[in-house]
Image (spheres, helix red, strand yellow):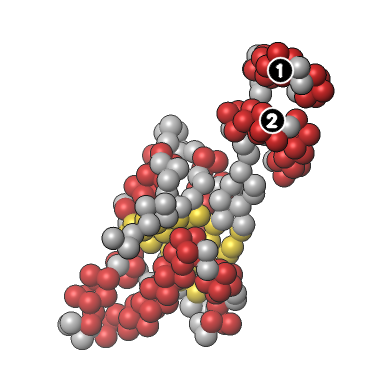
Amino acid sequence: PNADPGKVGVAGFSIGGLSHVVLALKNMHIDAVISLDGSIASVGYLEDMKDQYYFQPERMRAAFCQISKNKNNPDTNPSTFLDQVKFADTHLFRFADLAHQDFNTYSIFFNYLFTNNVEGEKAIDAYPMLCRLNLEFFNTYLKNDEQSLNFLTAPPSQNGWSEEVMSKQYRPGKKVPPTQVQFLKLIREEGADKATHIFEEVRQQTPEFVLFDKLEWRVLLGLGNEFIEKTELEEAIKT
């Protein structure tokens, strides 16, 4: 009963850190995605995915957090997908000295804690950090918590963590371009001047953005005719 269906976050480990990304690409109701050493950062999976229809980082609208191993050898777990996300905030955290299984709770408890396996000491030490990053990320994008965002974007040392253990990268997303439907609605409701201002803002940050191609200009012509019929001649001319 306390769940807010208007704020949805998903997290996945390994292959789940790939499937949840695909889910967010297909479902714009997802607000935040965490990939825990997910296959979205696997060289093999990336090679298989790059020609697939759903591999469209530019469609990502959910805030995206990639938490991976190999801090000192990042090419082993490339951030290819994350680097191509334009219109959503992205966070990248890399840990040193962790293995793939160290990013899930089952391994921490049953492979290390319950067996007193001394080989898991670094994983056990890193586990609270992993949990805290997940919590602060979801608080940021599901609860609009500014303190959590400050935590995520601060240097690791400011949060009491060694930068030898973990690295971070944060990139705010660009303003999301309007769809054709949204743009036409904007002209109808707020006028051509407002719509033109927003269009120019988007073009400045994303020069390659195309709202209407050479054939779709007829849509604007039709809207202009709507204004003429309503005797709003000034808006018709601007449109």
Q: Please tell me which residue is depicted at 19% across the width and 75% down the height of the picture.
A: 110
Compared across the picture, whether 18 is left or right of 85 comes to left
Foreground label between 1 and 2: 1
Quadrant position of the C terminus in the picture: top right
Q: Nearer the viewer, residue 98 or 65?
A: 65
- Tell me, for residue 187, which label it has, or none: 2
- Find residue 49 and report its image quarter: top left
- Find residue 76 and report its image quarter: bottom left
Residue pushed farthest front? Answer: 231
Q: Is residue 58 above or below residue 99?
A: above
Residue named by callout 1? 230
- Percent position of residue 73, x then y: 49, 64
Q: Please tell me which residue is depicted at 28% across the width and 81% down the height of the picture.
A: 119
- Percent position of residue 157, x then y: 57, 82
Q: Amino acid at mark 2?
A: Ile
Compared across the picture, whether 141 is left or right of 107 comes to right
Compared across the picture, whether 34 is left or right of 173 comes to left
Residue 211 visible, this angle: no
Helix, strand or loop at label 2? It is helix
Q: CA distance from mark 1 to mark 2?
A: 14 Å
Q: Please tell me which residue is depicted at 64% across the width and 28% down the height of the picture.
A: 184
- Percent position of residue 162, x then y: 52, 82
